[in-house]
Amino acid sequence: MSLLPALPEGLTWLMLALAAGAFALGGLVKGLAGFGLPLIVISINSAFMPIELALGLNVIPPFILNLWQSGGRRGVAETWRGYAPVLLALPLGIGVGAAFAATLDPRWLIGAVGAVTLAFCITQLAGWRLHLAPAHIRPAGAGVGLAAGFLGSLTTVTGPPLVMYLLAAKAEPEAFKAALGLFFFVVGVMLTIAFLSIGFLTPTLALLGALMTLPAAAGMGLGGRLSRRIDPAAFRLGVLILLTVLGVNLLRRAVMG
């Protein structure tokens, strides 16, 4: 009789060990470059485990690690005043996306992860930047929230459209961090509810995801210390190249099976 707890069907201890490595790498990248934990983790994990398990495992750690970023009560109030349309539209987008995710063939979900990964890499490598006039920031927020929520339900990755939106709105650094923290808090709560409702997240998978916070946090801490010794631009370029390769491979799997 095994002393180890039963894992969800389709998940092995080897997969879980590899996933811990992916979370450590994602945390390292986030600590060094300031982005990419969910994107890196889902791109790697979906290469060796069923996509539904990769999605479920990727819900809790980013949610926990971004809690501090919301800036407390003051940061929440300021984010609500500036970006209420985003906060209101995110849950709606997640709800719609979850309905699709529950019925889509797994290859479509893998393709969605690959497409989002490639789109992010292309925009970053090309240096594309959007610009919003002050009068357009709040109206555009509703569309961004819907799109980010929809993509989040299919891939657990909401960062790229939200980051591009805040950059286009020229948010100040502290407001930028606080807004992203609150956005991700809302996304984490809603994704947890949505994935529980469609069976992508079980109590066991949620617990395993929470444990993955440990290697991710360790990676973030190491990345923060190394950021003073490694050229962030060169490291960022290397990560984008790696993600591009992963994105192409995911699209290949989606098309060829």
Image (cartoon, rainbow, N blue to C red):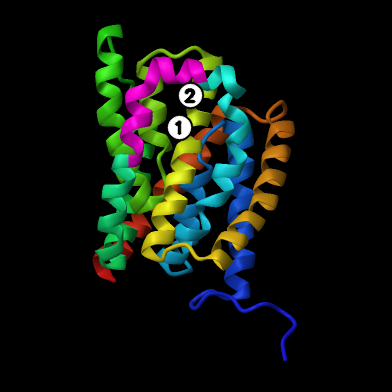
Q: Which residues are magenta?
A: 77-91
* Residue on which disc 1 sits: 183
Which residue appears at 41% of the width and 57% of the height? 195
Circles 2 and 1, Cβ within 8 Å, touching? The answer is yes
Residue 105 coordinates in the image, percent (x, y): 26, 67
Q: How many marks?
A: 2
Drawn side of residue 44 relative to residue 28, left or right = left
| Residue type at numbered disc 1 | Phe
Q: Is residue 216 rendered magenta in the image? A: no
Which residue appears at 55% of the width and 51% of the height? 60
Image quadrant in which you'd find residue 170: top left
Q: Secondary structure at mark 1?
A: helix
Say which mark, if any, is on residue 42: none
Residue 69 coordinates in the image, percent (x, y): 59, 28
Which residue appears at 65% of the width and 48% of the height? 216
Q: Is residue 131 visible?
A: no
On screen, 18 above or below 28?
below
Q: Is residue 88 rendered magenta in the image? A: yes
On screen, 45 above or below 31?
below
* Quadrant of the frame with the C terminus: bottom left
Distance of label 2 from label 1 (alpha carbons): 6 Å
| Residue type at numbered disc 2 | Ala
